[in-house]
Structures are given as structure tokens and as C-alpha cells.
Amino acid sequence: MKILVLGSGAREHAIILALRAESAEHEIFAAPGNAGIAQDASLVSLDPLDGAAVTSFANTHAIDLVVIGPEAPLVAGVADVLRERGIPVFGPGKAAAQLEGSKAFSKRIMDAAGVPTGRAVRAATIADVETALDEFGAPHVVKADGLAAGKGVIVTSDRAEALAHAAHYLPEGPVLVEEFLSGPEVSLFFLSDGDTVRALSPAQDFKRAYDGDEGPNTGGMGAYTPLPWLAEQFGSEADFVSLVTEQVALPVIRQLDAEGTPFIGLLYAGLILTSSGVRVIEFNARFGDPETQVVLPRLVTPLSGLLFAAASGTLEDQPQPEFSDDVAITVVLASEGYPEAPQTGRPIEGLADAASVDGVRIVHAATAGPDAPGGDLLATGGRVLNVVATASDFATARAAAYDAIGRITLEGAHFRTDIAARVAE
């Protein structure tokens, strides 16, 4: 199969690695990719936001499937352009992608579908924000309505800080003020062909920059899967997945279909397990990062078949995805200053040594080739790479991941040391 993957981050690298792990031989292209992806796919100089250019490349090279990784091309409608030309594409069209592109749209769909979520107020002015903050009380939750690369949300007990966050995003449009929900968070992915859904394995990520969930929100500093503690509340992980499928995923997919905007692609449900039951925090319209980096290494069912079935409307013919009994964790290495002001252009050393640790793979997020042949790779963004470790138990996986990341040198870099620590204990 000829596959074109759009994107340049660790999520896209993880998708490509999963495709490469299959017994089938695929010809894989990536646009624009990164230095790590270049080792596993043919890089294409192509703007992933340019639907016409992507379509032209797909036609010229007889691409069988286009996989859209990041949210920006989805919200820009690239999937629509491809579908109009009859090219199978994994990723929702522009209208359905508003499930991530607009928090207000997402809340409306949840209300219409009867999906359990927290109360929210759409605020267009600072006065509206102040009223909503007073109504819900502390801790305060304020969200940018549109895309913000995972950093548009603030949760704080400081009212002034919440107002400052709202003031920062209000020039771009209304913000959402939501009631605070307390409990452990879970990420759960659903493949959808617009009608049928198939769930993947639940994962938990770590949004805060520093140990102990301190510091600012980030795009995610680590993750692990499976979640054995779900059995304490739901009987088993399978029972939890079944519950969320029936109460969250299927109602949303059916509501979007009823509105003439079928959702074809990956529905990411960000969930919180409150004392009153499961509640949806947010939806994304694509694979989550860094959860993808731990979910896909455990996937036994060929990923290409699942993605193509979703893209071609035949997901009902696919059995429920199977996963190995192994556990997986990932630790993100971030540049100095991330998330506020990451320092880029610095060399990365020790990657080969890190990759030699048993059970470890290095998944690249923001890397570029060396300035000269034989030189070091360079960090080009905030979250530079993921160290992913799989093993039979969490203690072993954690030991491998932290052994490997300790062998990597990047001036000023930081990472969390407590990923999956509690579940390992």
C-alpha cells in the first residue's frame, strides 16, 4: 500500500513506525516530516495545509491512503479536497473537525447528543468571564475556543491569572469558562468511518511541565498504557471502554452524521472520572500526542487495515482491535524554556546509545538534520523527542525509559521523572 502521512511530529512518527512494524510492505511518504521520520519514510516537500498540492501529489504517485496527523490541516479542510477527488483519507472534513477547532461547537454537539460533560459558559468579554468565574467558583477553568497547540487551557485557583489568560485569547474570539471537574483523567481513541466506531486502548498523559503536576500546561510530557486501575471502578478496562463507547463515542458520531457532517477519522475523547461518573473534558479530531506513542506499539491488529477501513467506510467489517499484554510508557524530552519560550537549534547527542536500551525506541517530534555530514541532529521545537519503552511490567518499562533518556544530551533540556511512577508502585 502507498501511504502519505501529513505532519511533522512524534504522533506522525509513531504512526509511521506502527505501519513499518506490519508484515506487509508499505511505501510510505511523509510531508513535511522530521529527521527521525526521514529514517522510516520518504520525505516530501509539501505544505500539509495546501489541499490542492496534497491532492496533486496523491494522484501523481497513486497514493492509496492519506493519513492526516495534526489538527491544522483538518480544520483547514484538507480532507474535504482529497475526498472530492475520490482519494481515501483518514481524517474528518472541515465541518466535523470543528469538534476540536471550536470548543463551543464541541459543547453544542455534546449537549445535542446527551453526552455527559461539565457546565460551560461562552464568554465574549472580560465582564462575561468575570461573571462566569463567580458563578462556577474556584478552581477556575478557562479555554481558548480555537486551536492553541494544547496550551489554550488554564486551570487555576488564582482569579487574576484566569482573567489574564482570558484576556490573552479574547482578541481571537470568545473563550469558554467551565466548571472544574475533579478526578483522574483518561484518553481514549476511537476510529470512526462516520457510522461504526472501534476503540483503542485507554491511556493517561501528563499535561503539566514538571514533576508532581506542577508548572504550566503543555502539549503533554509523557504517557502510559494500559490503565490497570480502571478495574477498581469499572470491573475491567474492557467494561470501561464499552461504557464510554455507548455513552460518548457513538452518540457524538451519530449526532454529527445526523447533521450531515459525518466524522471519518480518529475521535479523541479526553475524559475525567468524577465521583458522579465519566465526564468529557474535550474532544480532538486526531490521534493524541503523546498517547499515540504508547498506544500504537501495543496494537497487534495491523494499523493500515484499520485506517483504510475507516477511510473507505468498511470499519464494520473489522474486528475489535487487539493489543498485546505488554505495557508502554513514553517520556518527553523538551527544550530549555518549553512551553513558554523554547530554545531551538541546539545539537542532540547520544541517540544511538539511548536506542540501544532493550525495549526502547526513539520517536522524533522536533528534529532536523545536522548542519554538516556526520554532525548531530538539531532540536527545532519545544517537545523534541519521545523515549518510548515497552516491557512486561511498568517497573521494567520505566527503568528502561529513564535509562535511555539519561543517555541523551541536549543543553538545557528537561523532562519529568514521575511518568507512570504511581502505577509502577
Image (cartoon, grey):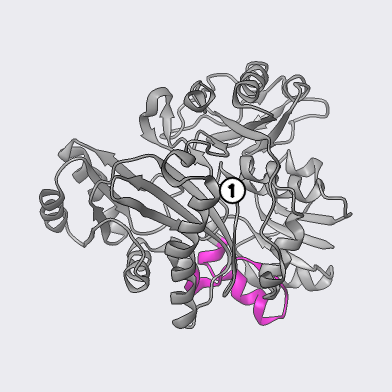
User: Is 349 positioned to the left or the right of 162 in the image?
Assistant: right
In the image, residue 349 sits, relative to residue 139, either above or below, namely: above
Quadrant housing the N terminus: bottom right
Q: Which residue occupies the foreground of this view, 125 or 136?
A: 136
Q: Which residue occupies the foreground of this view, 300 or 214?
A: 300
In the image, residue 74 sits, relative to residue 343, either above or below, namely: below
Residue 248, x across and y down, in percent: 43, 62
Query: Which amino acid does the dot numbered 1 rest on?
Result: Ser
- How many numbered marks does the figure carry? 1
Q: What residue is rendered at 56% in x and 41% in y?
A: 290
User: In this view of the protein, can residue 284 be seen by the observer?
Assistant: no
Residue 88 highlighted magenta (yes or no): yes
Q: What residue is rendered at 50% in x and 33% in y?
A: 221
User: Is 69 positioned to the left or the right of 62 in the image?
Assistant: left
User: Is 240 positioned to the left or the right of 127 in the image?
Assistant: right
Q: Which residue is mark 1?
A: 201
Q: What residue is rendered at 54% in x and 22% in y?
A: 413
Residue 117 highlighted magenta (yes or no): no
- How crowded is the residue under tag 1: few (<14 C-alpha within 10 Å), some, or many (20+)? many
In which quadrant of the rendered view does residue 386 lie? top right
Residue 67, x across and y down, in percent: 68, 61
User: In this view of the protein, can residue 126 be seen by the observer?
Assistant: yes
Q: What residue is rendered at 41% in x and 42% in y?
A: 233
User: Is 179 positioned to the left or the right of 6 in the image?
Assistant: left
Q: Secondary structure at mark 1?
A: loop
Q: Residue furthest front?
A: 235
Give the magenta range: 73-96
